[in-house]
Structure formats: structure tokens, C-alpha cells
Image: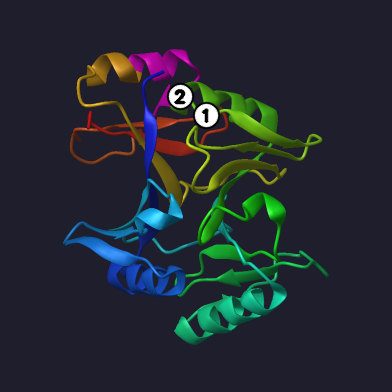
């Protein structure tokens, strides 16, 4: 299919606060600042071809996010420095029942969970963000769906627990599907956007994505130029207009 990942979107009570936090932590920059969204962008050297997009919502965060970021570190000392920096910027430690693990679980100023990983060879060339992690009842099923609609091939498997997709360029973060049996309860606070190329027919691409396993969803509100769909496990995502 002819779509590609273009955004990771995070709902926020105070988008400007979250955008500033993530830009400072990652060493990125605010590229777009408008009333209805703030975009944080990576330097070209990171190989990240998505924006982090923060949008205002009235609803408070209620449950653990089903989509989160894992951040990369180069050495144990670098990991400790990143943890200290995150806490200084307004993060807090989070206990999700992870126990004694080599990575550190934190939450940003609005409670969105993220992990600061210990050094891992697989993430040595990803830049600041190692991976976008999606909870999945069936990682293989979700990985297959996202491979079909984005063209990102499956490059890693860890038994039935984890399946990882990498951009064809071999740069930037992984997109990973991690086994988790929690039941989805509310609309995801973090979601992905995909977009067709500029010359594509938007309606035809939407139908193609639906035929590939997505389902349309109505979140209410005014008619929008993009379409909101869900993947085979009910995770919302948007098919944006061609670009």
C-alpha cells in the first residue's frame, strides 16, 4: 500500500508544556506552533522522518498508554544522565510492575509513560528514540497489518513477545509490537498518522487500508479532511490527506 508513517500524535491538556519537555529531552526543536497543534521535529542526523505532534484535548489521562516511546542510550553513564535530565525537566518515575529491570520507566509531565533503555546494540543507530512501542494481544497480527500499510518490513522477532519493523532506509526508530494482555478501555492518547503520496487519491487509499484490515471509526465532531480508522486491535490512527 502507498502510505507512510508521518506523525506520532500525543493528546495533551497543555501541548506547549509537553512539546517543550520532549524537545528539551530529545535535543529536537519546535517546528510548528499553532493553536490546534505543536510539532516537534528531529534533526536530520537522527533519521527520524516523523513529527511528534501535540494536540489539545479536554479529557484527562485515565489509564496506561498502549503506545509509548523507548529512548536509546549509548552507555550506562549516558542512560543515567538522560534519567537525571528527564527528572529535572519535569518527568517522574513510574511503577508499572516492571520489577528489577535494566531500563528505567518514567512518565512525562502529563503522565505519559516512556522508557529509558540501557545500551542495546540493536538501537545503536536510531538516534534519540529507539522505538515506538505498541501494546498488542497478538504482536504478529499487528505487525503484519502495519507492514502492509506502511511498507516497513519485519526485521526482528523475539518469540511470540515482540515483533519489530524498521524503515526501509534502515534509519530512525523501530516500530515494535509488544505482547500485553491488557484490555483496551478508552481512546488511545497516543496514536500514529499515515499519509499517501501527493499524487494519490485519498478516498481510494482509505478503502485500500480498510481492505487491508482496518476499520472506520466515528469519534464525533465536525467532518475532517482526514479519516480516522482503527487497526485490527482497535488502536486509532489517521489516514491524512496526500502529501
Residue appearing at x 67%, y 79% in the figure: 77
Which residue is drawn at the image coordinates 16% and 61% (left, top)?
35
Work out whether residue 45 or residue 84 is closer to the camera in this orientation and state it. Answer: 45
Cβ–Cβ below 8 Å for labels 2 and 1?
A: yes
The quarter in which the C terminus is drawn is: top left
Q: Residue at coordinates 37% horizontally, 26% vertically from top-left?
A: 3
Q: Answer whether residue 34 is magenta in the image.
A: no
What secondary structure is marked by label 1?
Answer: helix
Task: Tell me the SS state at disc 2.
Answer: helix
- Residue 222 falls left or right of residue 197: left
Quarter of the image holding residue 12? bottom left
Give the side of residue 70 with respect to residue 163, left or right.
Answer: left
Tell me where residue 218 appears, x and y as whole percent: 34, 32
Asked if residue 11 is positioned above or below residue 183 in the image, the reply reads below
- Which residue matches tag 1? 146
Q: Quadrant of residue 205?
A: top left
Mark count:
2
Q: What range is drawn magenta here?
A: 207-217
Give the residue pinned by disc 2.
149
Amino acid at each position: 500500500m502507498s502510505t507512510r508513517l508521518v506523525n506520532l500524535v500525543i493528546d495533551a491538556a497543555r501541548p506547549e508544556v509537553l512539546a517543550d519537555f520532549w524537545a528539551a529531552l530529545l535535543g529536537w526543536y519546535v517546528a510548528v506552533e499553532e493553536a490546534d497543534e505543536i510539532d516537534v521535529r528531529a534533526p536530520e542526523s537522527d533519521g527520524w522522518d516523523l513529527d511528534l505532534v501535540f494536540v489539545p484535548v479536554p479529557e484527562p489521562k485515565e489509564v496506561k498508554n498502549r503506545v509509548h516511546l523507548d529512548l536509546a542510550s549509548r552507555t550506562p553513564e549516558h542512560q543515567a544522565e538522560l534519567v537525571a535530565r528527564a527528572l529535572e525537566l519535569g518527568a517522574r518515575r513510574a511503577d508499572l510492575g516492571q520489577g528489577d529491570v535494566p531500563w528505567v520507566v518514567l512518565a512525562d509531565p502529563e503522565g505519559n509513560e516512556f522508557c529509558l533503555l540501557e545500551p542495546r546494540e540493536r538501537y545503536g543507530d536510531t538516534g534519540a528514540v529507539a522505538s515506538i512501542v505498541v501494546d498488542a494481544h497478538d504482536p504478529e497480527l499487528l505487525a503484519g497489518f502495519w507492514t502492509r500499510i506502511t511498507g516497513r518490513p519485519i526485521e526482528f522477532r523475539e518469540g511470540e513477545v515482540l515483533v519489530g519493523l524498521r524503515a526501509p532506509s534502515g534509519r530512525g526508530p523501530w516500530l515494535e509490537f509488544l505482547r500485553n494482555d491488557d484490555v483496551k478501555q478508552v481512546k488511545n492518547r497516543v496514536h500514529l498518522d499515515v499519509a499517501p503520496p501527493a499524487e494519490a487519491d485519498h478516498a481510494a487509499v482509505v478503502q485500500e487500508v480498510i481492505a487491508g484490515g482496518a476499520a472506520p471509526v466515528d469519534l464525533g465532531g465536525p467532518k475532517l479532511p482526514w479519516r480516522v480508522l482503527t487497526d485490527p486491535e482497535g488502536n486509532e490512527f489517521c489516514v491524512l490527506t496526500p502529501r
